Image (cartoon, helix red, strand yellow):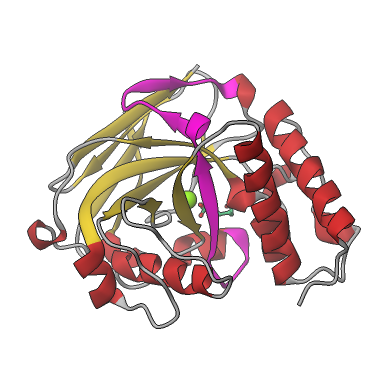
Amino acid sequence: MGELTKQEVSQLAEHLEKAELEAYEVTKITNDFPHMTYEDAFDIQWEIRRRKQERGNKIVGMKMGLTSWAKMAQMGVEVPCYGFLADYFAIPDGGEIKHDELIHPKIEAELAFVTKAPLKGPGIHIGDVLRATDFVMPAVEVIDSRYKDFKFDLKSVIADNSSSSRFIAGGNAKPVSKLDLKTLGVVMEVNGEVVQLGAGAAVLGHPASSVAMLANMLGERGEEIPAGTFIMIGAITAAVQVNKGDSFVVRYQDLGTVSGKFV
Ligand code: 0L1
Ligand code: MG
């Protein structure tokens, strides 16, 4: 159940989206609205999504966040969250990311699933996800919490579209039958130095369980994952802070590389 009025939801969506578009920090919204609920938090996120669509932006995918123990421990929360991806978040593989458009970006090594059939929770499991997956491809997420020093609680972060800001999909796409998703290794390099490494099972024990969780979370709102959806499953490793001038490459076992540069 929600505790915020429609007007408060709308004001908070405007507040957080303005911070995103103009790249400035705010304090976590639960400081001023301690009584807000998880439903309110998702209402704010969906209102930000509606505002972007009204302005002509397309929604080009979904993301799961905080799906690995490394990420949960890093951010001090214990439950995953989801967010949406807007068209202008997409950066080409090997492309440049404008650091000045962001507040304090970090990069995360992820995988993306692209569906070929709808997934509607509740009750979606890994088997359903594998059957509905067209292909899996590498993706790097650039997160940029609008909250000062990345200090937040789960409700505040959900309202802030789970820190979504940019993403790069690239490398090679493969069907799930050609991949060992649990042992699939990733190595992240920044400026030529290895900074993080991990394997697919770091994400909720199996990368497909993240997509199942998304379908089940969306199901709670009567929403589904339509066929043809691009879904990032959450970071396999901890997130790494990046500065202007940094370049990165993430190497994926059997799936090639994804790279980019902050300018
Ligand atoms: O994609 C993520 O795992 C990030 C979710 C939001 C929390 C954060 O900003 O680290
Ligand atoms: Mg992420």
Residue sitting at the far bottom = 123
**In this picture, residue 224 sits left or right of residue 22:** left
**In this picture, residue 72 sits left or right of residue 130:** right
Q: Position of residue 251 (x, y in %)?
A: 24, 40
Question: In this rendering, is residue 88 above or below 109?
Answer: above
Quarter where residue 222 is shown:
bottom right
Count of marks overlaid on the render: 0
Q: Position of residue 53 (x, y in %)?
A: 60, 39
Residue at (67, 62) in percent of width and height: 42
Question: In this rendering, is residue 13 above or below 103?
Answer: below
Residue at (60, 53) in percent of width and height: 162
Question: In this rendering, is residue 56 above or below 223?
Answer: above
Residue sitting at the far left = 178
Q: Nearer the viewer, residue 109 or 192?
A: 109
Quarter where residue 244 is shown:
top right
Magenta span contains residue 87: yes
Residue at (82, 68) in percent of width and height: 36
Q: Position of residue 232 (x, y in %)?
A: 39, 52
The answer to whether any part of residue 253 appears in the image is yes
Quarter where residue 41 is shown:
bottom right
Magenta span contains residue 204: no
In magenta, the rendered stretch is 75-99
